[in-house]
Image (cartoon, rainbow, N blue to C red):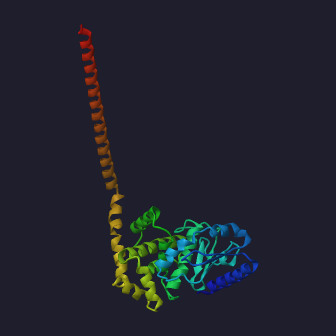
Amino acid sequence: MSHSGRRIWAAVALGVALLTASGWVTPVQAQDAPALVVMAPEALASARRRLDSFDRLQLSGIVRTVGLAEPGPSIQVVLAGEDSEAARGVSAWTAGYAISRASLVVLFPSRSPVYPHDTLEDVLRHEVAHVLIGRAAGGQEVPRWFHEGLAVAVERPWDLGDRSRLVWELVAGPRLSAREIDRMFDGGQDEQSRAYLLSTAFVRDLIAEYGAAAPAAILREVSTGVPFDRAVSTVAGRPLGAVEDGFWDRQRVWTVWVPYVTSGEAFWLFMIVLAAVAVWRRRRRGAAIRRRWDEEERAAAERDRLARESDITP
């Protein structure tokens, strides 16, 4: 941890002690999930009540995904205001962070969550996931891209917005290694958003290719002291570099076809097809109208015939 990180932790630890002494503590627990001790000053009481109603059972799936047999000790969740030392020690767009080895999560309820989060509850799940990943790794070093990608993957499902962002990134962005993605987390907000997106896509692809138990197996290897790269190689049966290449190769469906689909030629081809469909539908509708007219004419002729026959009948 950096000097600034230690300073933030010291400030938060002092705040935790003061909050506990003041009685601003709300212990909550969910079955098969880590117990959460939510702490907040009176000014953030409404946010604390909001987290009190959070369904902690959602966290049990994270426990299983990272491979923990049991969730472990309670996790302290501190809600901090903008005037706190914790808030001043991180970027203005950071909605929360976790210190895994301290079983601590710090959230900033007054900040609007940015990608990949939508709500305060999303941020809570994400940061709790970081603590659980750290526990599953036995406190050993795990690359940021895997930490963040897995935390997002277990935080919420992959939706259309995520897929659209990924398509754009694959078309417009360069092909990056895992280490290059890792370094992007130290950049500005846009770079961090790209890093979250690619990390999540990478982890999801890893799960799709090597099974839902792959993250837990990797973390289990790491917890025994095996370096992360070797842990991935053991689980995947191929070096991390080959796993990275496989990920990018599987994205070629986007990098090859999307530029064509969005090109001018494809646009005019689409317009021609659309026009042909419109002509076909118009002709079909015209044929149906003509058939209805013919049926109406035949019905009218039949009525006239019956009328004439009734006139000449004695």
Residue positioned 41% across, 75% down in the render: 202
Residue positioned 46% across, 64% down in the render: 159
Q: Which quadrant of the structure image shows residue 234?
A: bottom left
> Could you say which is closer to the camera, residue 284 or residue 212?
212
Residue 145 appears in view: no
> Could you say which is closer to the camera, residue 313 or residue 255?
313
Indicate whether 27 appears above or below 294: below
Residue positioned 55% across, 81% down in the render: 131
Task: Point out the image quarter for the N terminus.
Answer: bottom right
Q: Position of residue 137 (x, y in %)?
A: 49, 86
Residue farthest toward the bottom in the current orientation of the protein: 225
Residue farthest toward the top in the current orientation of the protein: 314
> Could you say which is closer to the camera, residue 11 or residue 127?
127
The answer to whether 270 appears left or right of 164 in the picture is left
Q: Position of residue 292 (x, y in %)?
A: 29, 30
The answer to whether 284 appears left or right of 105 in the picture is left
